[in-house]
Amino acid sequence: MKNVILVTGASAGMGKDFAQELLKDGNIVYGAARRLDKMEDIKSLGVKVLEMDVTNEQSMVNGINLIIKAEGRIDILINNAGFGSYGAIEDVPITDARYQLEVNVFGAARLIQLVLPHMRKHSYGKIINITSIGGKIALPLGGWYHASKFALEALSDTLRNEVKPFSIDVVVIEPGGVKSEWISIAMNTMIKSSSKGAYAVMANKVASAMDTTEKQNAEPAVITKLVREAIYAKNPKTRYSGGYMAATVLFLRKILSDKLFDKVLMSRVR
């Protein structure tokens, strides 16, 4: 039986790759994003595109209702919509910080609330939350972004045990460096917030380190492979990770003390 899959953030990068590759597998795929014009290419392939803003309640409700009316169920939710906003915690306006969490945490959480009754009804479902290795480590000047990813990791751990009795799996995918719009957006917000003042020197060093990293980032297909593994596994892992530096960073975070890890981290931005 074909899976009915909803992929958020399908207008670019990993989300777009998820949608088109899962469609090739024979699934019924809905791609959701604010920018419909950016999804014309995957629409032409057969992906059913939805205009959805994960900060807008009615937009999310309408999208889920549309899928249920058309298909009768939602089997897989891939919470991929999100972005990175950088800047010193002291500098970033709280309104911007709230928006970061609204998109990366509360939007994902609300969609989970909306799909769960339908998954429970069919005693089947998989919720795949795209977090980041940035949900396990926190870089300087990325506090609000990392706070959002740490939060999504915690929500996933709680949810996994809550919905297990209903035969619903919760999986976390933790990408490392992947080619996308992420770095340019994060760096633009960092320059806006912290390129002058007390954190200017650090901001320049972080920007330089990110520029070097960007050239080595993996293709989205690396993460798509992990998503496919999670979907088609009868008993999926709770976490998958991949992309540039993912394995190394997660290993070092596991074995090093906080202070020693800080030294390693800060050596990258000197």
Image: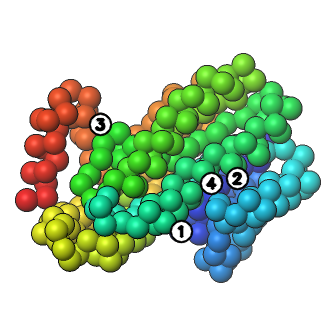
Identify the residue under disc 3: 250
The residue wearing badge 1 is 12
Of labels 2 and 1, earlier in sequence is 2
Could you tell me the amino acid type at mark 2? Leu
Q: Is residue 14 visible?
A: no
Q: Residue at x 76, y 53 (%)?
A: 28
Along the line of sight, the residue nearer the viewer: 225 or 158 = 158
Circle 1 packing at 10 Å, graded few (<14), some (14-19), many (20+), is: some
Measure how far apart labels 4 and 1 are at the Cα level: 18 Å
The residue that label 4 is drawn on is 107
Distance of mark 3 from mark 4, alpha carbons? Answer: 26 Å
Helix, strand, or loop for circle 1? Answer: loop
What type is the residue that disc 3 sits on? Leu
Seen from the viewer's position, the closer of residues 104 and 8 is 104
Q: CA distance from mark 2 to mark 4?
A: 14 Å
Disc 1 residue type (three-letter): Ala
Q: Nearer the viewer, mark 3 or mark 4?
A: 4
Instruction: Give residue 140's quadrant in the image.
Output: bottom left
Q: Earlier in the sequence, mark 2 or mark 4?
A: 2
SS label for mark 3: helix
Counting other residues with Cα less than 10 Å from the Cα at mark 3, is it few (<14), some (14-19), or many (20 or more)? some
90 to 267, vertically: above or below:
below
Colour scheme shown: rainbow
Residue type at numbered disc 4: Gly
Q: Nearer the viewer, residue 237 or 195?
A: 195
Mark 4 or mark 1: name the one nearer the start of the chain.
1
Task: Give the CA distance from mark 3 to mark 1.
Answer: 26 Å
The location of residue 267, given as percent across then percent down, is 9, 51
The quarter of the image holding the N terminus is top right
Could you tell which of marks 3 and 4 lies nearer the N-terminus?
A: 4
